Amino acid sequence: MKYKNAIALATLLAGATGGSPLLAANGHYVPGVEGIDGPAVPPPGAYYRGYLVHYDIDNLRGGQGTKAPGENTGEVTALANRFIWITDETFLGASYGVELIVPLQHTSLDFEGLGVRDSDSGLGDVFVGPIVLGWHGQQWDAVFAAGHWFDTASYEPTEPASIGKGYGTTMLTLGGSWHIDADKRWSVSTLSRYEIKTEVENSDVTPGNSYLIEWALNHRLDSGLNVGLVGYEAWQFEQDSGAGAGPDKAEKHALGAEVGYFWPSYGVGFNGALYHEYNNKTGPEGQLLRLQLTKMF
């Protein structure tokens, strides 16, 4: 019975056949973990950035955005540990750096409408980014990065709450910020990610490529506090391919607010953001809370 229920869930969430599409649209990257100053690469040095994310699932949406019948709720809590090293080297006029992301996650699902109840905890798929390039102008910043999410976490196709995706993802990043005034009090930014998936393990299914944009409009107050309007838009560009792949494509949209503050004397920054999702397709819909700690060494 558990196997049949898992298959029913996979059918509803066909845009992410290779894994539980709970935080990401259909790939690995979680939209909403970056907001204010997301595209700004810091000065040379070593940094730790921790993202504590809590996602409350209110309901499930089908391929046309229709709500699945019954009560389908759940929650995901993740701590993504990101280690960044920006070197003194430059390439094409940009600062060069590397990064590593090691996530920890707990997932609990109570999809009564589908007869599915499952939970899992553990180390998630690890990201290695050998290319981080940051450009800085008088009133603008830009970033390009490339890396790969490795299939390192535990994955079981019959367990919807599996921490792992069961496949790897190459991720390309491009983004920029524009500081509207000379004092850099007002800024607008966008950060995009394009994900290219590999074949799901022990199957012939390959999830379709996806694209997302995180954006922010923020204002820095006299006190140094940053406040802003933030959001994300995520789309699965291509259908999953292979035998058993579903016809629907995943989609996520959210609007939220963020506040942040940086203490230069301590080299510490803290941000908090809350997002409300709307108009999702082929996946869960809910609210996402993100707490973000940055430490410069």
Image (cartoon, rainbow, N blue to C red):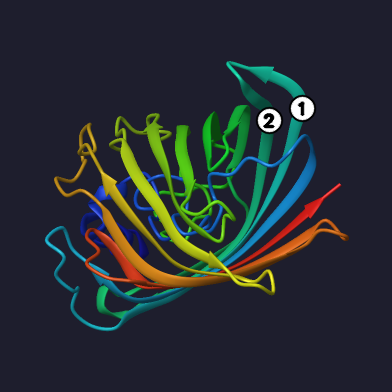
Q: Secondary structure at mark 2?
A: strand
Mark carried by residue 87? 1
Can you give x and y, in whole percent of width and height, for residue 285 in the image? 32, 70
Residue 132 visible? The answer is yes
Q: Is residue 163 above or below residue 261?
A: above
Q: Amino acid at mark 1?
A: Thr
Q: Secondary structure at mark 1?
A: strand
Can you give x and y, in whole percent of width and height, for residue 82 in the image? 68, 47
Instruction: Sort mark 2 into few (<14), some (14-19) or many (20+) by Cα contacts within 10 Å.
Output: some
196 displayed left or right of 132: left
Q: Residue at x 18, y 46 (%)?
A: 246
Mark carried by residue 98? 2
Q: Residue at x 73, y 43 (%)?
A: 83
Q: Residue at x 18, y 63 (%)?
A: 62
Q: Is residue 108 above or below residue 150?
A: below
Image quarter hosting the N terminus: bottom left
Can you give x and y, in whole percent of width and height, for residue 3 in the image? 34, 59
In terms of depth relative to the viewer, which is nearer, 164 or 127?
127
Mark carried by residue 281? none
In terms of depth relative to the viewer, which is nearer, 79 or 211?
211
Q: Mark 1 and mark 2 in contact (Cβ < 8 Å)? A: yes
Q: Amino acid at mark 2?
A: Val
Q: Is residue 280 above or below residue 167?
A: below
Q: Compute the Cα span from label 2 to label 1.
A: 8 Å
27 displayed left or right of 152: left
| Location of residue 9 by image quarter | bottom left
197 displayed left or right of 259: left
Q: Nearer the viewer, mark 2 or mark 1?
A: 1
Q: Earlier in the sequence, mark 2 or mark 1?
A: 1
In terms of depth relative to the viewer, which is nearer, 52 or 40?
40
